[in-house]
Amino acid sequence: MKTYQRLGMMGGTFDPIHYGHLVAAEEARYQLELEKVIFIPAGRPPHKTKREISAARHRLNITRLAVASNPFFMVSDIEITKPGLSYTINTMQIFKDKFPQAELFFITGADAVLEILSWKRVEELLRLCYFVAATRPGYQLAELSKNIPGFPINGTKRIITMEVPALAISSTDLRQRVREGRPIKYLVPEAVEAYILNNNLYRLHPNPTFQKNNRRGSQQ
Ligand code: ATP
Ligand code: MG
């Protein structure tokens, strides 16, 4: 098996994956000289149990479609094939066992880092991997570092902040757009857009008018 020194991990529900995720991952790869970034669609994220989440196979498929054109990106189905709730710490431990040589960098949006204090066994998690906090619209870096005063563990700062071109895209907004028949073009990769429309994702009731309009639009 190939040994890696520096691996990025991008966890998320990816319901759906969008350019915000992809830009953050690519920027982290470049800035932190990561050899690969592994996208890990969540099985059943502990904090999202209230909302209906799309079937795991759809989220896995769109994640694979989204990363296909980037040779540095990979997808792991580890959380999806594992029964029960997904905890980042368990996933990180599995990757640490698999790649003992590698430094792991868990890439998140700045808002997600602000939440980590509530995560299960956060200190242990920060020993296993670095956290890379990508700035996101509405989340200031200064605000972030104020809230997390370094989190020093053994004298090392385990949270790295990283500026990325701000993309005001969220999966929540994308789902709503699809539901309302508004466009998602240029917010997600084309293959992801096509997959969402072809599989009728995010539509409570398939809406024939929307599909007809959409077909007509693509023929022009
Ligand atoms: P939802 O609206 O359903 O919560 P989301 O767009 O936040 O979806 P997630 O799958 O929850 O997407 O996010 C996975 C990771 O990507 C999180 O760490 C999140 O902070 C980060 N992220 C999401 N959107 C962006 C963005 N536009 N720019 C940078 N990071 C992002
Ligand atoms: Mg989110």
Image (cartoon, rainbow, N blue to C red):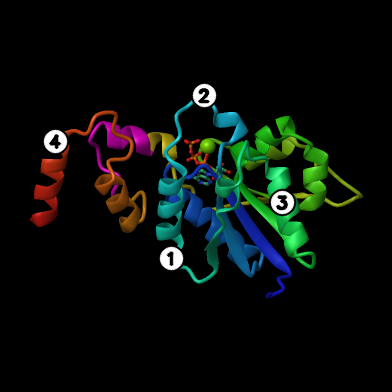
Which comes sooner in the sequence, label 4 or label 3?
A: 3
Task: Say which quarter of the image contains residue 46.
Answer: top right
**Alpha-carbon distance for marks 2 and 1?**
31 Å
Q: Which residue is mark 4?
A: 208
Which residue reaches farthest right? 154
* Residue 167 covered by magenta stretch: no
Q: Residues in magenta?
A: 174-185
Task: Say which quarter of the image contains residue 102.
Answer: bottom right
Q: Is mark 2 within 8 Å of ligand 1?
A: no
**Alpha-carbon distance for marks 3 and 1?**
23 Å
Image location of residue 119, percent across then percent down: 71, 34
Given residues 26 and 213, the one toward you in this image is 213
| Residue at image point 12% right, 49% down | 215
Q: Secondary structure at mark 1?
A: loop
Which comes sooner in the sequence, label 4 or label 2?
A: 2
Given residues 136 and 153, the one toward you in this image is 153
Image location of residue 218, percent across then percent down: 14, 54
Q: Which mark is residue 92?
A: 3
How many discs appear?
Answer: 4
Which comes sooner in the sequence, label 2 or label 1?
A: 2
**Alpha-carbon distance for marks 4 and 2?**
29 Å
Question: Disc 1 marks which amino acid?
Answer: Ala
Disc 4 residue crowd, few under 14, some 14–19, many 20+, Cα 10 Å? few
Q: Which residue is mark 1?
A: 68
